[in-house]
Amino acid sequence: MTSPFPFSHSSSKSINRPRMIFFDWSGTLAISGTRDLFVSPVSSRQEKIQLLMPGAVKTLKELKNLGYRLGIISNTKTPRYQMVNGLNHAGILHIFDYQLYSSEAGVSSKPDASIFLQALTSNGLRPADAIYVGNDYIADVTGPYSIGMPSILISGKPHPYRDAKPILRITQLSEIVSYLRSIT
């Protein structure tokens, strides 16, 4: 059966069902440029939810119900405690099993391989056990690719891929659910 998804990882191995899915924050789970408002203690739960990408909460809940562990790996200057408070006030903190932010001491920024390796090691995973989902080719595809971790790129426009290729390019976060159902 031919997969309806156009990209494959550079290796000839098929992609196995991942144990964990890591997400970028800005431009992937949340609308770009809204982090300060999201972490603000004065913005309401409803305001925080409106800053998320369309269908983000529904998609995350579906993935949780399918048995996936979910995490965030994000470049940010925002302190971890502010992100945790924002996620908690938005009512979605419980969805995430793990979070790693470049603002934390000793954490590198994407696309450096060490931020992805740190997340994998902390969760007892190999690169093939996880998928990274993001919206930036350099940070979110080449970084994971450098260690053999599959990635999914959210982009509404064609991209001239160089050596690193995502396993899938999607235009909406909800497309991840269909893809993951197709590989199980």
Image: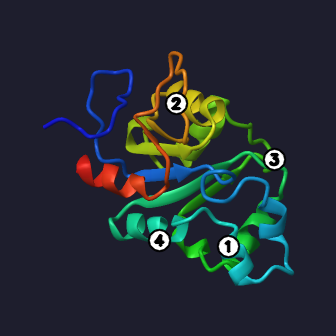
Distance CA(mark 4)–CA(mark 2)? 26 Å
Q: Which residue is under mark 1?
A: 50
SS state under label 3:
loop
Q: Which residue is under mark 4?
A: 58
Q: Earlier in the sequence, mark 3 or mark 2?
A: 3
Q: Earlier in the sequence, mark 1 or mark 4?
A: 1
> In front: mark 4 or mark 2?
2
> In front: mark 3 or mark 4?
4
Q: Position of residue 120 (x, y in %)?
A: 52, 44
Q: Which residue is under mark 2?
A: 158
Q: Position of residue 160 (x, y in %)?
A: 54, 21
SS state under label 1:
helix
Please give the name of the residue rendered at 55% of the width and 27% of the height, measured from the top-left corner. 159
Mark 1–mark 3 contact, CB under 8 Å? no
Distance CA(mark 1)–CA(mark 2)? 27 Å
Q: Which residue is under mark 3?
A: 105
Q: In this picture, is 54 found above or below 172?
A: below
| Residue 23 placement, left or right of 86 | left
Please give the name of the residue rendered at 81% of the width and 47% of the height, measured from the top-left corner. 105
Q: How busy is the neighbourhood of tag 2: few (under 14 within 10 Å), some, or many (20 plus)? A: few
Amino acid type assigned to the residue bearing label 2 in the image: Pro
Q: Earlier in the sequence, mark 1 or mark 2?
A: 1
Q: Position of residue 20 (x, y in %)?
A: 43, 52
Amino acid type assigned to the residue bearing label 3 in the image: Ala
Q: Position of residue 62 (x, y in %)?
A: 39, 68
